[in-house]
Image (cartoon, rainbow, N blue to C red):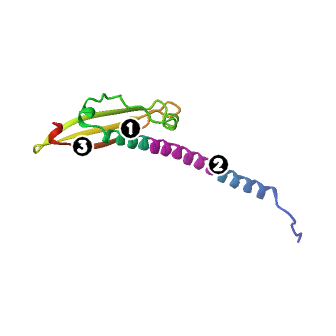
Amino acid sequence: MIKRKGVTLLELIVACGVLFVLLSTTSVMTGQILRQRRVLHHHVVATEVLANVMEQLDVMENRDLEALSEDAMELPSDLATDALPDARVRTTVQRLSEDGRSQLRVSTSIDWKSHIGEQRPTVTVVLWKPVLAGDQ
């Protein structure tokens, strides 16, 4: 019986095939992970922009809030402008009365497009401000 000292061509082809399948699966998964990371980053930036806008709106007087136009807010930083292409911040203010108490419902939303022009989901934050007797 002859002893083998090496690898056959068939074994090399099978090993290369297995390696190719593993590498192609890994590259697809890496692409999906990077895409999801980019989407999450945009969503986090949008949420931070809305938090900053809401802080600005929270310190405003109620009469100034009610006079606010829908598209009065702009993106506060270059980071937000770079991360959220064609972003629009919209604010709506409604006065609601229930049980003799009035409140202002301040809703701020942001929508943007991805870098390839695809519309991304809108992020919305709502602030409730009580209307005091002197603000009526």
Indicate the quadrant containing the C terminus: top left, top right, bottom left or bottom right.
Answer: top left
Q: Which residue is mark 1?
A: 122
The residue that appears at 40% across and 38% down in the rendered structure is: 121
Magenta-drawn stretch contains 59: no
Please tell me in which quadrant of the rendered image residue 90 appears.
top left
Say left or right for 100 vs 74.
left
Q: Position of residue 74 (x, y in %)?
A: 41, 31
For the residues carrying marks 1 and 2, which lies nearer the camera in this image? 1
Q: Position of residue 94 (x, y in %)?
A: 22, 35
Classified by dominant secondary structure, the portion drawn in magenta counts as: helix
Indicate the quadrant containing the N terminus: top left, top right, bottom left or bottom right.
Answer: bottom right
The residue that appears at 48% across and 41% down in the rendered structure is: 42
> Which amino acid type is shown beneath numbered disc 1?
Thr
Counting residues from the start of the chain, the first of labels 1 and 2 encountered is 2
The residue that appears at 38% across and 38% down in the rendered structure is: 122
> Which amino acid type is shown beneath numbered disc 3?
Lys
Q: Residues within 10 Å of mark 2 (few under 14, many from 20)?
A: few
The magenta span reads 25-45
Counting residues from the start of the chain, the first of labels 1 and 3 encountered is 1
Q: Which residue is mark 2?
A: 24
Say left or right for 11 vs 47.
right
Q: Position of residue 110 (x, y in %)?
A: 39, 36
Say left or right for 87 vs 56.
right
Residue in front for this viewpoint, 35 or 12: 35
Which label is found at residue 129? Answer: 3
Please tell me in which quadrant of the rendered image residue 19 appears.
bottom right
